[in-house]
Amino acid sequence: MKKLLYYTALCAVFASSEAFASGFNLKEQSAAAQGNAFAGATAGAEDITYSYFNPAGLTRHSGTKMAVGGTWIAPRSKAKTASSDNPVAGHSETGYTGNIVHDAISPNFYVSHQINNKWTAGFSLNTPFGMITTYDDDWAGRFHGTKSDVKTLTATPMLAYRPFCKLSLGAGVQFQYVRAKLSNAQITMNGMMPQEDHTKLYGDALDVGYTLGALYEYSDRTRFGIGYRSQIKHKLKGNIDFSKAVDMDQNISARLTTPANLTIGAYHDINDQWSVMAEFGRTYWSSFEELRILGQNGINSVTQEKWKDTTFYAIGASYRYNDKWKFRAGFAVDQGAVGEYYRTPRIPDADRLWYAGGIEYALNDNTTLNLGYTYIRAEKGRVRLDGTHEGDALRGAMRAKYENDIHIFAVGLNYNF
């Protein structure tokens, strides 16, 4: 019985970590592109920050350039009501939780250098996944999660090549570091009696993926782009600690895959002042078919997941007032990755609508400042875990209703050497 509880405890911790760490993809890697809700991000190549979406666009930038920026993400997620039925702890209810997510800053850095008329090299640092959620230790859904703190950092050297005057190709290698700190309540054994325990888990990994892109410039005013960022299969290693059953502490490992992303974009200058753009994106969340946990004592535990591939649509427009000022606007539809019967409280994801705007100002001939703002309104999210999913035997059933929205502020500074 003790070994069964032990296996289930490990499964419960990692099952929710997968939902959290991979269920929140940070698109906010460019203040300029954010002003258009990332419409045309794959085709725009307006500055070198667009290389995150399509490295081929680097060929449009001569000389040596550097860009540095940051995004302040202020999400709000409030559980209006929550209840659970745990096989040991029994029934529990929680009312209004307040905001369970935390503000975060997502920095980015880019540099590019034109080698010659055909070749351009680039490098970027980004934080493509991450979020923090915190609940009280005694809230109703504590067996499904109390705190989740997941961060990533990705370094990407890139190379772009122009084989023909209208076509550019790009590629890069993603070196991605991920760190996870998670906690939740667990059922362990005190002698022959089950007890409510609390666990803390730490794990990290550094693994490699790639990015590809192509840019076709149909004319001086119109261009099309396609970009692909591969999935990255992480092998996290770390440890799990129990507050009561300390003899169960041990080293663990888990496989965690961040999803692949495919984006296709179009950009068109109507005239010298007005530009329009559009974007289609596909995120392949369905790679999360299961989560496998391995322990140093031979544990081999699997948790079922039901993520689905999602689609992102965006349209945008820009207006160049004069040589110094440019204004941007955009709108996007972003699908949620998981339904209410598999959604967890670590990341209460839902379908979202994006409303974005931005301002670009040329400080001088070499320096440009970009400001972006986005409001994301999410549908009301529900969690309806019935306790029958693989790995949920000792976590039990849980139900909750969430209200979610996000305010995002971005700033970026571009400098031409």
Image (cartoon, grey):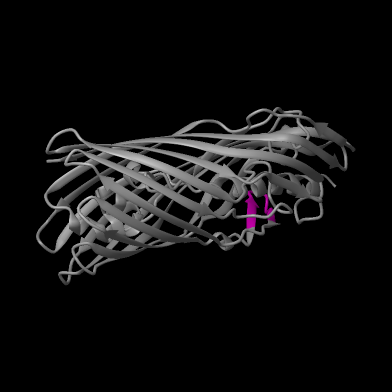
Q: Is residue 294 magenta?
A: yes
Q: Which residues are magenta?
A: 291-301
Q: Nearer the viewer, residue 308 or 77?
A: 77
- Residue found 68% across the figure and 55% down from its top: 339
Q: Nearer the viewer, residue 323 or 70?
A: 323
Query: In what quadrant of the picture does the C terminus appear?
Result: top left
- The relative height of residue 355 versus residue 285 in the rendered view (above or below) is above
Residue 251 position by quadrant: top right
Tell me where residue 391 appears, x and y as whole percent.
Answer: 75, 52
Residue 307 position by quadrant: bottom right
Tell me where residue 373 appears, x and y as whole percent.
Answer: 41, 37
Q: Nearer the viewer, residue 199 or 382?
A: 382
- Residue 139 lies left or right of residue 14; in this view the side is right
Q: Is residue 140 visible?
A: yes
- The relative height of residue 35 versus residue 136 in the rendered view (above or below) is below
- Residue 136 lies left or right of residue 331; in this view the side is right
Tell me where residue 202 appears, x and y as whole percent.
Answer: 57, 38
